[in-house]
Image (cartoon, rainbow, N blue to C red):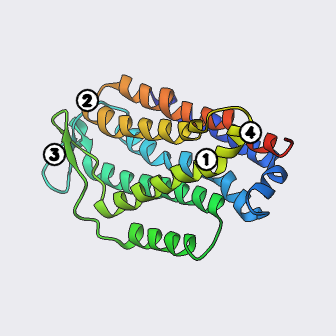
Amino acid sequence: MELVHWLPFIPTFILAYLISQHANDLNPLLGGSDLRVFLLLLIPLIQTFGGLMGITMHEYKGWQVAFFQNPLDSDVALKDCNNEWLREVAYKLLFLLQGAGLLAFSLAVFGFNAITIPFAVLSGLIAFIGPQNPKATFPFNGQPVFPLAVSILVVFIVNAVVNLIAYFVLLGDPLASAGLPRALAALAPLLLMLGGMIEGVIAESSFNQWWHFTAVVVFLNLGMIAQIALFPVLWRSILI
């Protein structure tokens, strides 16, 4: 199962390479800004490397399937359970990096203006210095899941919505020009979102490694592959 969690790095590097190869084609689509093209290239790297937080957590616990308990709250033998405190730290860093990726995509698409700059600054301030309690934890399958500060979760959700809109703004017209439905613009972000939800809620509460497999291989990898398949409409639209 450890190998499965590393698989998203393959399509990530492929996508980043494709974007770098077509930087000149993307430049006019992104306001003639090299910085915005650079942000677009960084996004898959930021989000996939953010997944290292989860891999670190799994590596620490030896990829064992066991219940979570917080050693700061009770006297527990960590050899018999997973470290809940480590999971909280991993979730915080994971969502900060994932949120940074979402924000970077939005800035790449919408550019830097009187709306996006304050939005980016406010998102960063709330995420980094916002209260760490209360947590958004809720029970699922009889286990507590989502040990993430509500402040970070709210910032993440808002940025996810803006990110989804940005996908339509970026890919909508090129998809239509290629004779493809505009709805395909939502394919990649929705697959990535579903993969994250399955991993964080179902897999982390059921302790079934097949749910990890489903989340990472089926949804997260397909989300990256969808971008590899759809992004070429951007540079092809220049030729139409």
> Real-space Cα distance between discs 3 and 4?
60 Å
Q: Nearer the viewer, mark 1 or mark 3?
A: 1
For disc 4, the marked residue is: 177
Q: CA distance from mark 4 to mark 2?
A: 44 Å
| Nearest to N terminus: mark 1 or mark 3 | 1
Q: Earlier in the sequence, mark 2 or mark 3?
A: 3
- Residue at 53% of width from left, 52% of height from top? 165
| Element type at mark 3 | loop
The N terminus, quarter of image: top left
Q: Nearer the viewer, mark 2 or mark 3?
A: 2
Q: Which residue is mark 3?
A: 76
Q: Tag 4: residue type?
A: Ser
User: How far from the left and from the top, in percent, is residue 62?
Assistant: 37, 35
- Per the image, label 2 sits on a secondary structure element best described as helix
Real-space CA distance between mark 2 and mark 1, rounded to the nearest whole angstrom: 29 Å
User: Where is residue 127 shown, x and y percent of the image?
Assistant: 40, 66
Residue 173 lies in what quarter of the image? top right
Viewer-nearest residue: 225 or 57: 225
Q: CA distance from mark 1 to mark 3?
A: 38 Å
* Mark 2–mark 3 distance (CA, rounded to whole Å): 21 Å
User: Closer to the observer: label 2 or label 1?
Assistant: 1
Identify the residue under disc 1.
44
Please indicate whether residue 120 sits to the left or right of residue 125 in the image: right
